[in-house]
């Protein structure tokens, strides 16, 4: 029999993240939705807590460090071993923490100091020496450029080695936490004539000469999160700030940098699952107040239409949740999970927008007004179906993997 109960250790850390979400994020959720670009000062308390937790070895409140295992983590929990296979490490714990904090507020979750998506990239590929230097930074992730979004092989930012330094030139747009993070993980080409194989990632400190914030975006949702355009103009960084090997291996393509997505996509899925659960809980309360009873004993078709719809949404949510757990578990157990990571993001991204907007619909005027957070979650969830690869791109990746076709064959 399959036991899908979470191990005790994971429940404990998820519960901690839930407390942060309930006590720090929810009370200020509307405040920063209405004050786009204001820095949420309350996060400084959070930042101190995150540092404290990192020092005590129970780090990663939001989860975006993406699952580099702390020493002794994983197999050390016999319960985990018994229930979910041979290891539950950082990825699974990161995923659950991202879910819980996003239940509180996904914009604030994306603004938690020291927990950027760039941290996941560092955790996935940094050497031990680099982990010593970058393990405790706050890193944003800069891939997108004015000339492309989905087609990440089209990177035109360049990195040229000059003595002991890389010199970076280019423009990055829509960088989450781009104006607040202490470091930016930048994708750049070391040789544009060699195509995608020459794309590497570089850790650029915020105070590096030649790096500047050109503008901040105004957005539909996640307004608590800053989204920046960054310029790199003869920006110099140390030679050993490249993540992974500087060697250009044309046969391997850009598998190295793409590997980060296997860790970050389940995390973004978890964010959608967190927002989706928030909306379902609020909707249940609204329906109960309106006298609609939701029963698990009567077939959905024999219940009020709103209750039947609720049950459908809940089942959809559960499917997304289980797919994300599978992708995270595979990452922890070093099983190739590109297919499952994309599946989980595609499912959760779509579920998130569907569930949150349906919740607005079923709650009627109350859902559309600012008297609850339902309309906000409807706006916030859309980005989770866009960044780290859109819905369509995830489906494309799934199709390529299932049909065993290369990106040249199936575009
Ligand atoms: C709030 C916000 C935060 C972001 N944060 C970051 C960040 O931190 N770092 C970063 O690097 N980027 C970030 N991005 C950028 C994000 O990753 C891109 O917006 C996303 O990858 C889509 O790219 P695009 O907007 O250029 O759309 P396009 O690639 O132009 O796509 C437009 C539409 O066409 C579809 N499409 C594209 N190609 C195909 C295809 N082959 N088959 C079928 N359909 C296709 C897409 O799914 C989409 O619906 C952020 C964006 C936003 C809005």
Image (tube, rainbow, N blue to C red):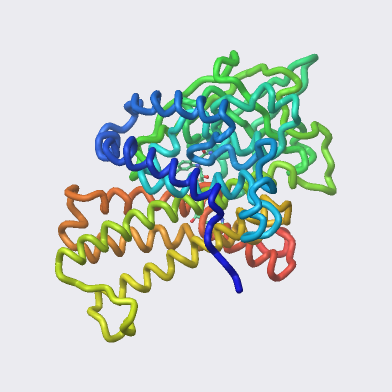
The reply to whether residue 16 is visible in this rendering is yes
Quadrant of the rendered image containing residue 284: bottom left
Q: Is residue 126 above or below residue 308?
A: above
Nearer-the-camera pick, 14 or 175: 14
Q: Is residue 251 left or right of residue 222?
A: right
Q: Is residue 233 left or right of residue 295?
A: right
Quadrant of the rendered image containing residue 148: top right
Nearer-the-camera pick, 136 or 388: 136
Please tell me how many numbered marks the rendered image carries. Answer: 0
Counting from the top left corner in percent of width and height, residue 224 is at 35, 35
Counting from the top left corner in percent of width and height, residue 232 is at 59, 23
Residue at 55 percent of width and 62 percent of height: 323
Residue at 69 percent of width and 23 percent of height: 132
Q: Is residue 385 above or below residue 299?
A: above
Q: Is residue 395 left or right of residue 163?
A: left
Q: Quadrant of the C terminus?
A: bottom right
Residue at 63 percent of width and 55 percent of height: 329
Q: Residue furthest front?
A: 78
Counting from the top left corner in percent of width and height, residue 2 is at 60, 70
Q: Quadrant of the N terminus?
A: bottom right
């Amino acid at each position: 029999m399959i036991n899908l109960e979470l191990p005790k250790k994971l429940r404990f850390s998820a519960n901690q993240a839930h407390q942060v979400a309930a006590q720090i994020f929810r009370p200020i959720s509307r405040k920063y939705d209405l004050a786009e670009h204001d820095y949420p000062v309350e996060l400084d308390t959070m930042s101190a807590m995150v540092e404290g937790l990192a020092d005590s070895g129970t780090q990663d409140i939001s989860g975006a460090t993406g699952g580099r295992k702390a020493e002794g983590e994983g197999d050390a929990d016999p319960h985990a071993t018994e229930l979910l296979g041979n290891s539950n490490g950082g990825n699974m714990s990161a995923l659950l923490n991202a879910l819980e904090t996003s239940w509180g507020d996904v914009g604030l979750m994306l603004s938690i100091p020291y927990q950027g998506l760039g941290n996941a990239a560092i955790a996935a590929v940094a050497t031990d020496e680099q982990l010593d230097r970058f393990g405790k930074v706050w890193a944003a992730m800069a891939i997108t450029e004015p000339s492309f979004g989905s087609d990440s092989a089209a990177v035109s930012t360049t990195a040229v080695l000059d003595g002991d330094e890389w010199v970076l030139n280019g423009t990055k747009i829509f960088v989450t936490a781009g104006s607040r993070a202490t470091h930016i993980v930048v994708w750049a080409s070391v040789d544009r004539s060699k195509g995608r194989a020459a794309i590497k990632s570089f850790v650029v400190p915020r105070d590096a000469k030649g790096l500047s914030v050109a503008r901040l975006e105004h957005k539909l949702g996640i307004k608590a999160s800053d989204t920046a355009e960054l310029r790199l103009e003869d920006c110099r960084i140390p030679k050993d700030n490249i993540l992974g090997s500087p060697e250009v291996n044309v046969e391997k393509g850009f598998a190295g940098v793409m590997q980060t997505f296997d860790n970050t996509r389940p995390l973004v899925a978890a964010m959608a699952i967190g927002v989706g659960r928030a909306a379902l809980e609020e909707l249940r309360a609204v329906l109960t107040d309106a006298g609609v009873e939701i029963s698990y004993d009567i077939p959905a078709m024999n219940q009020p239409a709103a209750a039947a719809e609720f049950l459908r949404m809940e089942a959809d949510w559960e499917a997304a949740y289980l797919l994300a757990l599978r992708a995270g578990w595979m990452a922890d157990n070093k099983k190739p999970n590109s297919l499952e990571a994309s599946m989980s993001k595609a499912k959760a991204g779509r579920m998130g927008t569907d569930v949150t907007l349906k919740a607005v619909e079923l709650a009627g005027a109350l859902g559309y007004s600012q008297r609850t957070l339902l309309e906000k979650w409807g706006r916030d969830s859309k980005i989770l179906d866009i960044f780290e690869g859109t819905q369509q791109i995830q489906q494309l990746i799934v199709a390529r993997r299932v049909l065993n076709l290369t990106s040249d064959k199936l575009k």
